[in-house]
Image (spheres, rainbow, N blue to C red):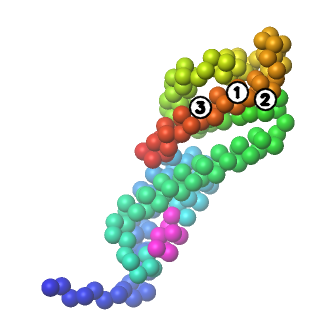
Amino acid sequence: MEPPRTPKSMIERDTDITATVLRERTKLGNFIRRRVHDQGDAEDILQDVFHEFVQAYRLPAPIEQVSAWLFRVARNRIIDRFRSKRRQVTHQAGREEDTAGTDGIEDLLPAPGGGPEAALMRDMLLAEIEAALAELPPEQREVFVAQELSGVSFRELSERSGVSINTLLSRKRYAVRFLRERLQAAWDEWLIT
């Protein structure tokens, strides 16, 4: 039978924390930067992860697999950051006066200049959008394609079709909502890998 473990002193815990930070910082930083292209955001996430590690390490229950724990926390912080930014974009878009009154296809995609991973994700999401567009009811697909891909204004669509602008706005809103839900799983999968 093993003798019971004695609790580590504060100095031993601080030494363990320092050793872990030094050992994991580069790998964890690279992991975060591959997913978050803004250097400031990446550094903020790294600091948040290590801050949470210090807090958790000082609790009575030990962290069993420190490296796996750090990467899991980093993944969660990255997802939180993307969700927060998406909410900010949606909130700002809601306040801006645009004739559409809805978010566009660009709001669903990573930024074009976001590097090779963002370009790959953009291509993958465009393929998913194409498949999802085929699943939309024809009225929603027509207004979405005309407005987003062809650049036709709602006023012009209304004049051509005889359908009110409000109805066209509603159809596009439903199309965008459907696309967001359909693409959410692909987006989350990309963030986790």
Residue found 49% across the figure and 39% down from its top? 185
Secondary structure of residue under mark 3: helix
Q: Which mark is residue 179?
A: 3
Residue type at mark 1 is: Lys
Kindly report the secondary structure that dominates the magenta region of the rendered protein: helix
Tell me the residue that label 2 is attached to: 100
Say whether disc 1 or disc 3 marks the residue closer to the N-terminus: 1
Q: Nearer the viewer, residue 141 or 92?
A: 141
Say whether disc 2 or disc 1 marks the residue closer to the N-terminus: 2
In the image, the segment drawn in magenta is: 49-56
Q: Does the residue at mark 2 contact the one at mark 1 (Cβ under 8 Å)?
A: yes
Task: Calculate the distance from the C-alpha at mark 2 to the C-alpha at mark 3.
Answer: 17 Å
Secondary structure of residue under mark 2: loop
Tell me the residue that label 1 is attached to: 172
Say whether disc 2 or disc 3 marks the residue closer to the N-terminus: 2
Q: Position of residue 50 (x, y in %)?
A: 50, 67
Residue type at mark 2 is: Ala
Q: Which mark is residue 160?
A: none
Label 2, residues with CA under 10 Å away: few <14, some 14-19, many ≥20: some
Work out whether residue 14 can be spotted. Answer: yes
Q: Position of residue 69 (x, y in %)?
A: 40, 63
Residue found 54% across the figure and 25% down from its top? 132
Q: Quadrant of the N terminus?
A: bottom left
Q: Position of residue 93 (x, y in %)?
A: 76, 40
